[in-house]
Image (cartoon, rainbow, N blue to C red):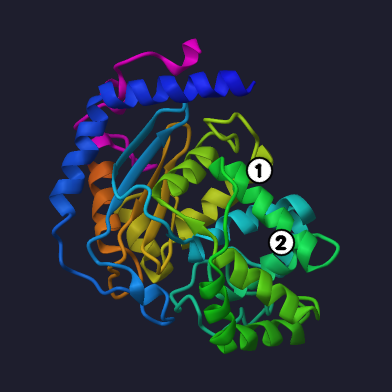
């Protein structure tokens, strides 16, 4: 099995080099690398260390082709991009109906860290805001903090294909400055949305947000969801296929902070962003995209990442609801080199 996956990876690299799609991504990178808009997040000291010029793009297709350009291997903390994956694990652990009794799936125009719950049900609005993410983290099964964390890290390994590391300084900074998240957790405890293991769950939440990733990892995660929950390189299942629809639906409607409506209108790809500068986006049945660029717009999304995704959606007709003939046919642009299927 390992030999087969090695051959698949070799075929992918050959095809990626030969494909005009790689040239297209390189042109996108060159087009936007000198954009000066945006500000690097600095709410904790570790995030402020990021350099504004860092910029990586990666795309991974569901048949295992990989295209990396720029700073695709530059590592940063995953932050809020962990939220949809944790939501998926909670669905596997507890089932759709129980999870929905604790966390709604409604978009909200409020800031992601707002101390607000649904007035009628007392649930957090969705799993992509902090309150909802804390609630879904609380649902993760395990006998104590260590086992629960191991299960979370193992899940990320299945998505990315490599064992994840936690940035301890970022975790400690998040923990030290996380009083707003504590307020959310205790508010939800008051309404029975979370259990009384508040500090354990908050530590897990801060740790999952401190996992180190790069643009390549984000594209792998997205491609895994686009591929029905199966990692297209390793062939390993990362999430039960029954819950992929749930995860990517909430990504589409709630994944880009309070820019989510505009994103769904203009780009139309399920996506999740984070204040560390990452964006992960996917087109079901086709590919996953990962971008990294630290400068953020006023809503907390990567300026360059949004521009890259806008161009991809427009040029290749990747908007989920697009019915017009695209300017470029993605299949044609991906052709070249050996077929991964032949391996």
- Residue 131 lies, in percent from the top left, at 60, 76
- Residue 146 lies, in percent from the top left, at 77, 64
Residue extent of the magenta highlight = 315-343
Q: Which mark is residue 15?
A: none
- The residue carrying pointer 2 sits among few (fewer than 14), some (14 to 19) or many (20 or more) residues within 10 Å by Cα, namely many
Q: Residue at x 60, y 72 (%)?
A: 206
- Asked if 108 appears above or below 74 in the picture, the reply is below
- Asked if 9 appears above or below 260 in the picture, the reply is above
* Label 1: element kind: loop
Q: Which mark is residue 239?
A: 1
Marks 2 and 1, how far apart at CA = 17 Å
Ranked by sequence position, the earlier of labels 2 and 1 is 2
* Label 2: element kind: helix
Q: Which residue is mark 2?
A: 149
Q: Nearer the viewer, residue 14 or 27?
A: 14
- Residue 94 lies, in percent from the top left, at 78, 56
Magenta: main secondary structure? loop
- Residue 241 lies, in percent from the top left, at 65, 38
Q: Residue at x 67, y 76 (%)?
A: 202
Q: Is residue 140 visible?
A: no
Judged from this view, the residue extending furthest toward the right is: 143
* Front: mark 2 or 1: 2
Apparent side of residue 296 relative to residue 61 in the rendered image (left or right):
left
Q: Residue at x 26, y 74 (%)?
A: 39
Q: Residue at x 44, y 78 (%)?
A: 111
Q: Quadrant of residue 278?
A: bottom left
């Amino acid at each position: 099995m390992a030999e087969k996956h090695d051959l698949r990876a070799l075929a992918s690299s050959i095809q990626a080099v030969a494909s005009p799609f790689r040239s297209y991504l390189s042109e996108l990178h060159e087009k936007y690398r000198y954009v000066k808009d945006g500000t690097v997040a600095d709410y904790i000291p570790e995030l402020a260390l990021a350099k504004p010029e860092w910029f990586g793009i990666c795309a991974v297709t569901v048949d295992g082709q990989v295209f990396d350009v720029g700073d695709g291997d530059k590592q940063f903390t995953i932050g809020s991009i962990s939220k949809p994956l944790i939501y998926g694990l909670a669905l596997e652990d507890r089932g759709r109906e129980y999870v929905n009794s604790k966390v709604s799936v409604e978009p909200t125009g409020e800031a992601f860290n707002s101390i607000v719950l649904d007035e009628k049900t007392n649930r957090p609005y969705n799993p992509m805001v902090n309150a909802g993410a804390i609630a879904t983290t609380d649902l993760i099964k395990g006998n104590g903090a260590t086992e629960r964390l191991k299960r979370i890290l193992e899940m990320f390994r299945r998505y990315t294909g490599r064992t994840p590391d936690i940035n301890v300084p970022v975790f400690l900074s998040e923990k030290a400055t996380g009083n707003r998240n504590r307020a959310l957790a205790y508010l939800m405890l008051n309404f029975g949305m979370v259990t009384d293991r508040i500090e354990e769950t908050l530590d897990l939440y801060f740790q999952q947000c401190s996992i180190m990733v790069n643009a390549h990892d984000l594209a792998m995660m997205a491609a895994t969801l686009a591929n029905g929950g199966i990692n297209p390189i390793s062939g390993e299942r990362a999430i039960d296929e029954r819950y992929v629809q749930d995860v990517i639906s909430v990504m589409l409607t709630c994944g880009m902070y309070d820019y989510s409506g505009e994103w769904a209108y203009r780009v139309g790809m399920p996506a999740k962003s984070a204040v560390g500068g990452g964006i992960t986006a996917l087109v079901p049945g086709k590919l996953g995209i990962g971008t990294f660029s630290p400068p953020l717009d006023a809503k907390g999304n990567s300026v360059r990442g949004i521009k890259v995704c806008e161009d991809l959606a427009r040029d290749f007709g990747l908007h989920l609801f697009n019915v017009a003939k695209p300017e470029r046919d993605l299949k044609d642009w991906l052709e070249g080199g050996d077929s991964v299927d032949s391996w």
